[in-house]
Amino acid sequence: MSELDAALTVFAQEAEELLTDMEDALLSLETKPDDSETINSLFRAMHTIKGSSGLFGFNAIVGFTHEAESVLDKVRNGERGIDAELISVLLDSKDHTAKLIEHCLTQKEAALPASLAADGERLIRQLTGRQTTDMQQSDDSVQLEIEGGGEISVDDNWLISLEFQKDAFRNGMDPLSFIRYLRTLGEIKQILTVASEMPVDDDMDPESCYLHFKIAFQSDANKQTIEAVFDFASDDCDIKILPPNSKLEEYLNLLNAQDDNHVKRLGDMLVQVGALTQNDVNHALQSQQANVDAEQEAPSKPLGEILVEQHVVQQPLVDQALKKQEQTKQKLASEANYIRVDASKLGHLINLVGELVISSAAMNLIVERHGLSDAGDVAASMNALVSSIRDTALELRMVQIGETFSRFKRVVRDVSKELNKDIELYISGGETELDKTVVEKINDPLTHLIRNALDHGIESPAQRVAAGKPAQGTVQLNAYHESGHIVIQIADDGAGLNSEKILDKALANGLIKPDHDLSQQEIHNLIFAAGLSTKDQATNLSGRGVGMDVVKKNIEALRGSVEIDSIEGEGTTISIRLPLTLAIIDGFMVGTGQDRYIIPLSMVDECIEMNANECEIDEIQHYINLRGQVLPYLRLGDYFHNQIADSNRKRESVVVVKFGQTKAGFVVDELHGEHQTVIKPLGKVFERLNGITGATVLGDGNVALILDVQGLIQAAIKNKSRPAPFLTSQRIQ
Amino acid sequence: MAIQLKQQKKGVTQLAIQGELTIYSVLEHKQALSQYLSSAKDIQIDLADVTEIDSAGLQLLMFLKQEAVSRDISFSLSQHSEAVVEVLELLNLSKHFGDPIVISADWKSS
């Protein structure tokens, strides 16, 4: 008896885990409806629960999960589409399953309560009701109908549709010449010339082109060649080429024969077998993108559907390619062999790679110094290897940020319930990768910022409606790469920051003086100061005035920065900028006097020789005139006060750096070029040094300092706004 | 002017297009031909002297046909020159215009 109890406990635990997974999977399907892996996991959850319930004779559970399982099986095989409706029914089904399990575990013998049974029946109806959604848009007839009558039937011919644009004639196109040329490749079986859009009477401009052609073409040439005929016209003509049915078989076979060692994108697969050309795919992607831009709400159509709609490929081909893609994914998933590695081992490896980079630099230096020409080649190839080892090693630690993001879905759901607000979380850029160590450290600040957005940012539905906004608030989480950094944005469409409130509080706290002279941006940044909260009442979520300063500190500890951008009444966007990795970067080495400095290469915008025509320096007003653009500047030599004599400056160069939106020029004596930089943290003693984030060891054993570009840009801006009476006074620093 | 009015009687307007019927001349041709569309009841166009025709020229012919049909004007093309026939054949439009085409034995091809 006790054994059975133990087994039941295991069953209960397992079922609970599976149901939790199922919920996660369903939530993620809302954003990625065609992720087959997720659909598989849904199916497995239902399937496993059904199986285990059968063992214990829980027929009610078996009956219900069987229905859910068969629906999911259809979804998995592509016989049924998944949409928001189905997802919510499935979510209900998951809850219902949980109830059934609870019932079976607590009152084994009792019959199902009527309400539970009724729920089950209703859900089953909903699940199975609409079995065939709109999945059958393809019937195999390949016929193009054209307004104005007439159609072309095609058995074994290419189908080419040419829709010339109005300006085609004016741009020197003569459609006839393309058609004549086409005849050199094969035989035109049938051609249909239509001018259905030709306006009447005076509206018709004889120099505009209103002609469209549909051509049935027999040829052994491949799609690429046929498309090349119209290459010249591609700007002025909408070209669609549909392969003949006889080719279809060939393509299908090729698709099947494609190697399935890695998952390819649908477009790539079709291009590879020759059913599509790269142009077709680009076209379809563009129109997909255009749709996304036009109506952000509606989910964009899958690429396959667009391609079929544009008449560039037949439905069966797309289906087959998708199936193949699916198979490959499954095969890979079943084969996926991950090795769990101790993070510290990985860290050790990366440290070693760092040392390797340094010693290979040293070797290069020696080879160069002694002019060993035979060793030069070997050194060069080793250098290339070292840098690819470096990249691969760093990649090992790269993870997608999506997983971190999707955790917030539940947070948003729960918190918005708790606050009685209706808030939707949109996630984009989840595939952006960054260093694992950074991901771990960014989690807490992100949670804090999101809770802030939910609690302070988004107003209650009533307030929102009163302000003329939709009752549902939105929070957007977005991530993207920008010049060697990852940018994470948290945007809400809530109330925005109230500058006056912030100022009042800041005055009361003594953070600023009454005669302050702060820009809007600087006022907003005050919320990162310790002890400042504009919320009159603290909730258990946020509002105690601790937190934002911690957020800022955490992010700065990662060599990142936070920016806040808010419009009162319209919302707040917080952008976090983080370096992609904490270990090794591509640097740009510059020198002043005897010293070497490294600027992260990704932040270097350009380098210019000083006093060249395009770059003028104004020592008095303290700015650089770069082709009409005014930039603050900083003499690195002066800033780090180690210049021996000013008079000795022979040649100076300006390195223009940018961080986010801000730019500045660093004036240096020498440019040394790119350098693989292994970042070594500075010791505690140097922690409070301004303008420096770390150091690196050069090939010759010297140390170069890695500049904190962001900090230095700020310093340069301050320098500029303050009139500099004498140049020498800046040396004091 | 490359359009010649050959005859105009009892509502029958006989026109002849001469020389090029291409993008360079369509604008001119259209203006010249449009006036007949508003007055004539029967338009016959002689294409014997069309030396060259391109897509724009062809489009103009299609436009005239379309206008004529919508205004209930009877419209016919005759005496197609070699250049015209070649294009009509290429684009499979002979049926669209529905006029008898006489192919001369002297022509090289088509």
Image (cartoon, grey):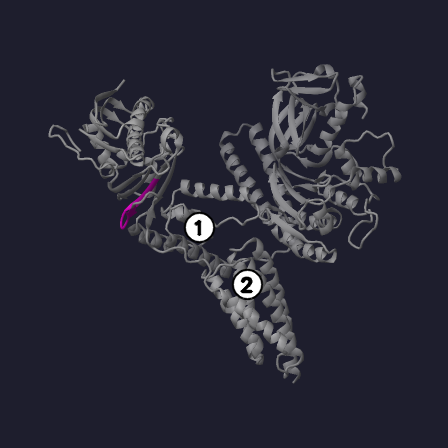
Q: Which residue is at 55% across, 54% downward? A: A32
Frontmost residue, A612 versus A679: A612
**Chain letter of the residue carrying label 1:** A
Task: Answer above or below: position of A37 versus A370.
Answer: below
Residue on which the image places disc 1: A305
For residue A680, which quarter of the picture?
Answer: top right
User: How many residues crowd mark 2 within 10 Å: few (<14), some (14–19), many (20+)?
Assistant: some
Q: How many marks?
A: 2
Q: Which residue is at 66% across, 32% downward? A: A661
Q: Do the residues at discs 1 and 2 belong to one chain?
A: yes
Frontmost residue, A672 versus A585: A585
Q: Of the numbered discs in the image, which one, if any, rests on residue A236? A: none
Q: Which quadrant of the figure contains the N terminus of chain A?
A: bottom right
Q: Which residues are magenta?
A: A151-161
Of callouts 1 and 2, which one flags the residue occurring earlier in the amino acid sequence? 2
Q: Estimate the x, y position of residue A232 in percent, counting from the top left.
A: 36, 32
Task: Judge left or right: residue A678 versus residue A180.
Answer: right
Q: Secondary structure at mark 2?
A: helix
For residue A137, which quarter of the picture?
Answer: bottom left
Q: Which quadrant of the figure contains the C terminus of chain A?
A: top right
Q: Main secondary structure of the magenta part?
A: strand
Q: Of the numbered discs in the image, which one, if any, rests on residue A41? A: 2
Q: In the rendered structure, which amino acid carries the disc numbered 2?
A: Ser
For residue A15, which quarter of the picture?
Answer: bottom right
Q: Secondary structure at mark 1?
A: helix
